[in-house]
Image (cartoon, rainbow, N blue to C red):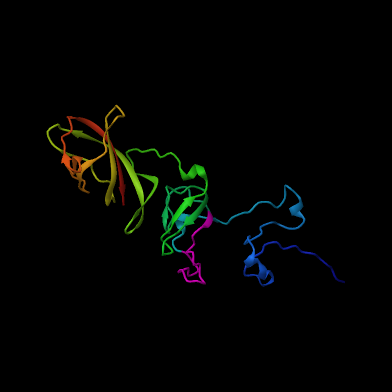
Amino acid sequence: MSIATVSYAQVRIVNSATNAGVGNMTAFIDASSNNTANGQPNVGKGLLFPRTDLTLLTAFGGGATGAPTSFPSRYDGMIVYNTATTGVAGVGTTQGTLSPGYWYYENKSATVNGGTWKPLTSAAIDPKVTIGTAETATNTIITTPTGNKQLYTIKGTFTASGTSTAVNIPAPTGMTTMYGITIYKTGTGTVYDRSLYSYTVATTAGNAITGSPSMSVVYPADTYDYVLEYLK
């Protein structure tokens, strides 16, 4: 006794020996379920991505070194469904802070680990960032000679004596470079200044000299708020 069955396999991969012509087609993969379900509007239409925790991704597998036969794009454009609710990816840099959802790896660098993970959803790409007295990762990545760096920010307060150009703006833990600063008159929300004459990455009093790049100034005696932007 024999049983005849008909199977409609519609996952088409370029390396499949039975689909030699797929390499010249626009679509790399057809994720439709089967010939029968394709005719039904409510069956077999979703594409389910594997789920992964990007904070646990500590290395790219497969020996992707940029060789012509081994991921020459260095994973540029790879999409994953991330399950991590916070933190940053273990490989490459991360735009902002990880949240559950689809993320893609943008890598135009010459190394596998030189890219940046970015969220696909518009809400996650440019969310509002609340700046407080605790360190906050912004949505900005700064390109530096040593690679892409996450921009952090923090809010603080200093009191000017009215007799000295030096004020106490402590450096956050791990800070290597100040990227920018905005100084407000406390309680007014009015921007007082956006510059400093000099800044020393230290935690002792008097590590900031107020003023512009060409002239230091003495702030009137008062209390001021500041928002510090920096790299680590």
Q: Residue at x 34, y 46 (%)?
A: 152
User: In the displayed structure, would residue 2 be above or below residue 28?
Assistant: below
What span is colored magenta in the figure?
60-80
Q: In front: 80, or 213?
A: 213
Judged from this view, the residue extending furthest toward the left is: 163
Asked whether residue 186 is drawn in magenta, I would say: no
Q: Residue at x 43, y 47 (%)?
A: 97
Percent position of residue 185, x then y: 26, 30
Q: Residue at x 30, y 29 (%)?
A: 190
Judged from this view, the residue extending furthest toward the top is: 188
Percent position of residue 134, x then y: 33, 41
Q: Left or right? Give the position of 96 relative to 9.
A: left
Q: Left or right? Give the position of 69 relative to 156.
A: right
Quadrant showing the N terminus = bottom right
User: In the displayed structure, would residue 80 be above or below residue 165?
Assistant: below
Judged from this view, the residue extending furthest toward the right is: 1
Q: Residue at x 50, y 42 (%)?
A: 123
Q: In front: 108, or 83?
A: 108
Q: How many marks?
A: 0
Q: Main secondary structure of the magenta part?
A: loop
Percent position of residue 182, x then y: 29, 38
Percent position of residue 27, x then y: 63, 60
Q: Left or right? Give the position of 218 relative to 177.
A: left
Asked whether residue 78 is drawn in magenta, I would say: yes
> Which quarter of the picture shows residue 112?
bottom left
